[in-house]
Image (cartoon, rainbow, N blue to C red):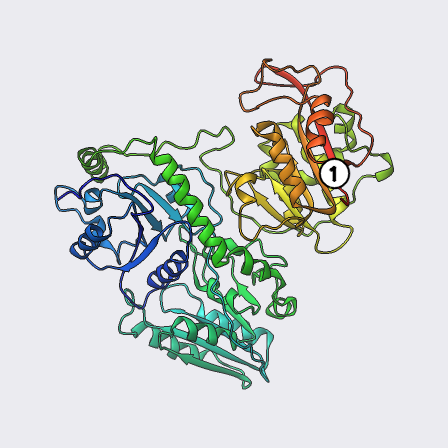
Amino acid sequence: MIFRKETMDLNKNPILFVNHRPQKCGVYEFGLAIGNTLTKSRKYNFIYREIDNWLEFKEIFDQLKPSIVLYNYYPSTMGWISEWNGMSINSHKVNAIQIGIIHEVTQEISDRTTDLLFDYYIAADPTLLLKNPIVYKTGRLIPRFEGKLQSNKIINIGSFGFATQGKGFIKIIEKVQEEFDEAMINLNISFAKYADENGDNAKKIAKEAQKFVTKKGIFLNISHEHLSTDDLLKFLSKNDLNMFLYEYQENRGISSVTDWAVSVKKPLVITKSKMFRHLFECYPSICIEDNSIKTILKNGIKPIEWLYEEWSPDNLLWDYERIVTDILNKSKTRPTPSRLQKKIMYVLNKFHLKRIRPPHSISPWLKIDDSNLFDGFVDKSYIPLNDNDLSYNIILDDPLREKYKRTLDFIKAVSPDLYAKKILKANIQQGFVFDTAYRIASQKDSMKILAIGAFEDTAALALKKLGFSIEFIDPIINYDLETYITKPSVKSQNFDVIISTSVIEHVKDDERFIKDIAYLLKVGGWGILTCDFNNSYKIGDSLPKVDCRLYTQKDFLERLLPSIPNCKLVDTPNWIYQNPDFIYDNCHYSFASLVFKKVEP
């Protein structure tokens, strides 16, 4: 059985989003929330359907004739699409672009994913690096909650989840009693369809939990009903603080429980379980290993407030729309394996006769063991260099390397592993950027920094580890600047400082690049850039393979700066030098800085 092939017209052929029918499971709830968001698209015609078997799917497919099928796939809930009948699997019979959502995803799983089941994959894991060209990622989805928040006479602390291994319900009771003499602990432990359908584990945990209450002022309220989305949000909103103290578990995907907890805008406490790795960047830390419950309660929702906008329905819809657009563009040139080729690959892979791997990104900066996991904040202080002795638009040469040695030593102490991967002589750029950005951003609280090309940028990472409000963008982490600027939550004049360390020389349209930086800067905001520089460079001269150009003083003064008339250099430039002092790819050049401020129009 092969579905008929025909030319796909997106105006006529919709995108079919497939979820399974309602079950007491997080996968269904996740798919329903995503489906409800996608059907609001004005760019693509997403159609949501709940399907539980192959014949039902075939009937709907023949009726709708979708150009793309997007599956909320999990083996135990949608096994019919991956079913092997000895001849082929069902997904090989579908004549459309197929995209599967990966739920239990890690960096290793993402890197190893192949197109044997689906053509492409989407993972809702903001921490992934985009190493695999068939795996995309999105942010999370924070539901909108419009209910009233209530206050309590004694502190109410809540949590919820299925009674599966490692949820830490008992640990919540223990931690609360360590810090409080009076508290109400509200736990909703519902029965899991695929792991505890009769509720035996849930009831066992509830009975055991009562034994751990040792203080007279501590009250324990445990319920087992499976709550609807609205009721779950109401349950969480009635608590003064919500806690999820999962055990440390390797090789697990991100848990969705915190999506609901963030929605109600109440303080949140987590452990450093890898299932909460997407929240490790919240500052001040919301991890129980770093701060007490009382400290996290006192800090309020400030550490998580930014997530409400970052992972909004509008941003998630934008994520899916840009991913679909990119996949459609790829499909014009990417060869599609025939049904026979897929069958052969599947059999070889199934019996480990040949392990199929996708063609990974050819980015020269990516290594197989690279990850994007934030390893925590540091309790260190930095004293900037003497401002009276500094210039900002200069050649970053050996005398500057000596001047910034203390800065570079600080960066090395903060991020030793990443620093060790860098070319020693090139580190002057990170030293300059870090010191300059630190000097500006520390002048007042809550200054916002944007780091462009932030993958493995030690200056950006050091600023983050010190607790600055800094956002990272990079094609390997998420997207490039041109894409980022179209994101619904991105606004003009949004940042006090924008840094970009040795990036602009890799950008084809550098004038568009610097215009976008100026657009995002607040009036009075600083743009801090470094680049590869050789004042003798002419078009046609040899270049490092990764560069589009080397910069000259003429580029700065006659091309880039005139393209941003609302920005001015912060000092008189001195881009004069004798000989290039850096060699890469058999090319001689130096490094230069370009630092400007946005002024009133």
Q: Is residue 502 above or below residue 187?
A: above
Q: Position of residue 571 (x, y in %)?
A: 82, 34
Between 185 and 105, the residue placed more toward the observer is 105
Between 438 and 90, the residue placed more toward the observer is 90
Q: Position of residue 297 (x, y in %)?
A: 61, 70
On the rendered structure, is 312 left or right of 325? right
- Look at mark 1 in the image and give the residue it sits on: 567
> Is residue 142 visible to us here?
yes
Q: Residue at x 60, y 13 (%)?
A: 541
Q: Position of residue 462 (x, y in %)?
A: 65, 44
Between 81 and 430, the residue placed more toward the observer is 81
Between 396 and 534, the residue placed more toward the observer is 534
Amino acid at dot 1:
Cys
| Outermost residue toward the right in this view | 388
Q: Is residue 254 above or below residue 363?
A: below
Q: Secondary structure at mark 1?
A: strand
Q: Position of residue 408 (x, y in %)?
A: 71, 35
| Outermost residue toward the front in this view | 11
Quarter of the image with the C terminus is top right
| Quarter-of-image position of residue 148 | bottom right
Quarter of the image with the N terminus is top left
Q: Residue at x 67, y 49 (%)?
A: 493
> Is residue 408 visible to us here?
no
